[in-house]
Amino acid sequence: MDSNALDLAGWDWAQILSSTILIVDYTIKVIAIGVVPENRRPSSSSAWLLLILFLPLVGIPLFLLLGSPYITGRREKIQEEANTRLRQGTADIPDWPEALGVPEMFGGLVTLNRNLTYLPMVTGTDHGVRTDYEENIRVMAEAIDAADDYVDVCMYIMTADSTTEPFLAALERAAGRGVTVRVLFDHLGSRPYAGFRPLMRRLDAAGIEWSLMLPFQPLRGRMRRVDLRNHRKLMVVDGTRAFMGSMNMIEASYGSARNAQIGRLWHDIMVELTGPVVASLEAVFVTDWFTEKGEDLSIRAYDDEERLQKREAAIGQRLTSGKGVSAARESAPATVDGAGAEASASSDSASVTSVPSDSELNAVQVIPSGPGFRTHPNLRLFVSLVYLAQERLRIVSPYFVPDESMLAAVITAAHRGVEVELYVSEQADQFMVDHAQSSYYEALLEAGVRIYRYPAPKVLHTKCFTVDDLCSVMGSSNMDMRSFGLNYEVSLLAYGGDITESLHGIMDEYRSVSSELTEEEWEQRPWGRRWLDSAMRLTSALQ
């Protein structure tokens, strides 16, 4: 036998294999420590690292699939193109209506939004912030029946059921008389419900153009990240009327006979708007439509300059003359369901000499957000507004799972002496979110935040908050890390009109039926609940 030959038989292969595995394991973990925290929140970094270090066979594949907080490739390029068009198309429009004279600090936030999303603050007439679920569907169906040119619909969840029947029938009638109808709904958001496939068949039969948003269909070669959602809810009619808010197009018990039996119904809000703000909402839809269908609808321009100036002058005159929100509502009261909104859509889109001058005219700014925006527009706006509060901050969020910056802002506001109110469901509709949300209550209560829990089994699905009597935000965005990073959302910032006051009225109703959680009561929760809350809080940071 050649003395120079390796004696492989004498090697301890088991030891070699275990050493190799150990070296690879530590190499991966060392690499992860340097790679995972890059451009990521500390809480998210810690959660991912814990998963990778303790369960590498689970954590590494998940991180490679879901670890990036941003989109790349085609969708990223489309968002960049849309941002370029918006920036160029609105270059001559000021950040806010020149006649408005907004407070300096608030003006800085409007400019922030403009720099992040390229959409300016414009005017919009409020035709009602409505809380009645079926009433919202009826009013939207009536708007579709009045359409002459086109109807654009974007919904996170959309199904065919007895509650949505008036809406779907109106879409079919519109398509039948030659109106262009375009519908978008999220694939994984809508797919679990029984009305999903019947909806697609009805849309096809009616000749309605439609597309799934963020489709995941591997057998058809349509692959994408399964953790992303388009969570927006909006509708635009003829470029003159728009609806947006928190409500999905599904019956209020979300297709569950059990939910219907025990009274587990979702409670939401939608706002109906006319005026220049419609063009902003339309720009959001056009971007989503091009992303999914590849059809360039072009982004419609705002109203002509003369009309804009007259509308801006009207709202500016009301504010500078001392006719603020509260005073204005005395002369033009609006109920919680928006029944007091007297201006009609036709009057708002009439000749340039017809300019509404009562409290229904608001200064508004649309804020789109999502993984296509690397700057987190909704999170930056929300945190900035919390720091702006001086007297009273009221937050309604079905899923309050804030990141470090939002939590610090809310707690700091309470320590500054701001009266902070948080409205949540007594029991959230999602197990993990319910416990993750609860894990923040102790710190909030200790800081003096008043937590009101909407009675179970009802689900408080409204997303909005108000800052003093100054301004408000409403829309599809929750105050959780999913909405800040993984969901495509749309929010509406309102100032100088009746929307903020309407939201205050809605919150007053929520407060009247909710129970306040006290610090003493929360301290009595069992140890098992504490452990589960903390464990679910950790999973919420895996973004």
Image (spheres, rainbow, N blue to C red):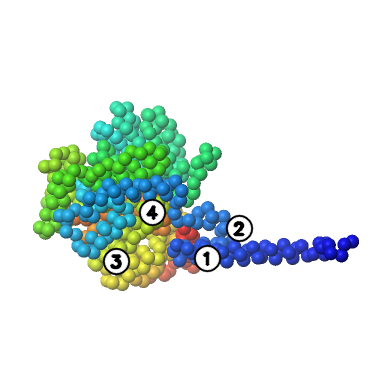
Q: How far apart are marks 2 and 3 (CA)?
A: 42 Å
Residue drawn 11% across and 54% down? 317
Question: Disc 2 marks which amino acid?
Answer: Leu
Give the crowd class for mark 1: few <14, some 14-19, many >=20 residues within 10 Å: few
Q: Identify the disc placed on residue 18.
A: none
Q: Earlier in the sequence, mark 1 or mark 2?
A: 1
- Label 1 or label 3, whichever comes before in sequence order: 1
User: Circle 2 — which element?
Assistant: helix
**Label 4 sits on what residue type?**
Phe
Per the rendering, the mark at residue 57 is: 2
- Across and down, in percent, residue 263 comes to 38, 48
The residue lying furthest to the right in this view is: 1
Depth check: give the residue in front, 197 or 215.
215
Q: Which residue is drawn at 21% across and 63% down?
A: 104
- Answer whether residue 64 is visible to the viewer in this image: yes
Q: How crowded is mark 2: few (under 14 residues within 10 Å), some or many (20 or more)?
A: few
Give the residue number, with chain letter if any, for mark 3: 387
Secondary element under disc 3, as helix, strand or loop, is: helix
Residue located beneath label 1 in the image: 34
Q: Distance between the residues labelled 1 and 3?
A: 33 Å
Q: Determine contact: label 2, label 3, CB under 8 Å.
A: no
Element type at mark 1? helix
Q: Which of marks 4 and 2 is nearer the N terminus?
A: 2
| Residue 474: percent from left, percent from top | 30, 53
* Label 3: how many Cα within 10 Å (few below 14, some 14–19, many 20+): some
Q: What residue type is labelled 3?
A: Tyr
